[in-house]
Amino acid sequence: MIPALILAAAPQPPNIVLIMADDLGYGEIGAYGQTKIETPNLDRLAKEGMMFTDFYSGAPVCAPSRSVLMTGRHSGHSQIRGNKKLKPGYSPAVPEGQVPLEDGTVTMASMLKEAGYATGIVGKWGLGGPHTGSAPNDRGFDWWFGVNCQTMMHTFYPPHVWRNREKIDLGNGWLPIRARLNEVPTHEEYHKDYVGPVYVETVETTRAKEFIRKNQDQPFFLYVATALPHVALQAPEEMLNKYKGRWPETPYLGQRGYTPHRWPRAAYAAMISTLDKQVGELLSTLEEHGLKENTLVLFTSDNGATHDVGGVDTEFFDSVGPLKGRKGSVCEGGIRVPMIARWPGRIEAGSKSELPSAAWDLMATAAEAASANAPKTDGISLMPELTGDPISTDRHLLWEYPEYGGQQAVRWGDWKAVRRNVKRNPDAPVQLYNLAKDLAETTDVAKEHPEIVEKLYQLMVNDRSTNKYPDWEDWVQKGRL
């Protein structure tokens, strides 16, 4: 008698949890050198996975960085290259949302959905208002819960969130997103004027955990687009109390935008620790349901630390370490960000990578991990690097950012070329830095290396496409609002 063949079941593709912080600087978690702010969960994630030392965001501000992440196209090719809102303002009469992705855009979510994944997002979207045809449910997400418009997240007590296509009132009302005071409000006054009953990050974390539980028996992709630690300075009271009194404080009265705070340093530290707590809750949920071993967790930030608006003191916290620049800059401090990847059994615990890589690589990485059909992107899959087969590449990384005067940057090996104020001066010179010798970008060596300057300038000129960048009136005329 011939024995029956026993066929082993094909392994289930890994779940993918992509967590993106908002304005988290390169040096703001312990694993990357932070000494004042406690981040035990992120530090544990780094110990259990791989830390990238030379990883970059897609852009130096929110919306274009999210476009790059979701489409795998760097900012010289991506549709959205600036933080343009469809209509300025913050009130019930102003339509929500930033410039939308075009119809037919393939996103990381739609790619993974086609591969059989359940797809969900919690948090801040920023890639098209609810009536533009570019809300998350239009771009590959089966389910979403969060805030559509970036301006709405200038308070952590927004008036409402979206659950798929339904607007959910949080009961916070339309609290101020900016104020300038002459004196520090009392604790009671502050809570009356700036704090609502629902801290949005708390409820979003709860919904993220529910998504994991609901989809634990099938492959899922969860994109957690937290708004922490973007200002305004607002943190849950119990987390704020952990830091109050640790350091000397000068109350912030709103003189540099957003809302005031009595304890700005404590508040900022509390926000980063709240982010860390979010991550810890998500990791615990994966473990509770036996999903840790078959889940690829990716953690990064949409850009570097904020440029000291809203009461943030990045000098005090050494938020970007030795790097030059902050959010809004294509210098290293504006775009070099943490990136941690964990997949037990596939990624060596406690490993590090010095590979220059960027947010536009994550779509190709997710595609290879999930055996999905990837569209054409500007990225490469980092799976070989993650699984112990170091990548050797001669490729370059490129950024084009039309705001803050107009900026371009290219990294090629240890060389970094930067052009700034390009809008005012289309012939702005190329500054050249050797990051191996000058990580802080202090010494321009362009005159000593004209051949390198010419090579990188030609990449700035040629590795880009024309950007449509539609304005508000275009969308009104098309009847999309």
Image: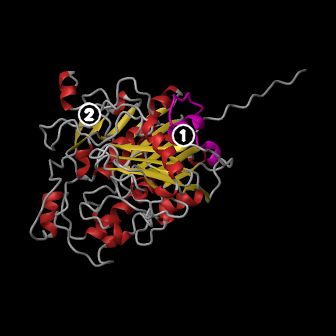
**Colour style of the rendered protein structure:** secondary structure
- Residue under numbered circle 1: 15
Q: Split into 4 quadrants, where in the image is the C terminus?
A: top left
Frontmost residue, 31 versus 235:
31
Looking at the rendered structure, the number of numbered marks drawn on it comes to 2
Toward the right, the furthest residue is: 1
| Magenta span of residues | 362-385
Looking at the image, residue 265 sits to the left or right of residue 213; the answer is: left
Camera sees residue 341: yes
Is residue 372 highlighted in magenta? yes
Dot 1 or dot 2: first in sequence order is 1
Do the residues under discs 1 and 2 have CB atoms within 8 angstroms?
Answer: no
Residue at (61% x, 43% y) in the render: 383
How far across and down, in percent of the image, does residue 53 sit?
Answer: 54, 57
Looking at the image, residue 428 sits to the left or right of residue 262; the answer is: right
SS class of the residue under badge 1?
Answer: strand
Which amino acid is tagged 2? Gly
Is residue 322 highlighted in magenta? no
SS class of the residue under badge 2?
Answer: loop
Mark 1 is surrounded, within 10 Å at the Cα level, by few (under 14), some (14 to 19) or many (20 or more) other residues, namely many
Camera sees residue 283: no
- Residue under numbered circle 2: 129
Q: Split into 4 quadrants, where in the image is the N terminus?
A: top right
Residue 185 in which image quadrant: bottom left
Q: Is residue 178 above or below residue 151?
A: below
Residue 401 in which image quadrant: top left
How far across and down, in percent of the image, does residue 406 sit?
Answer: 31, 46
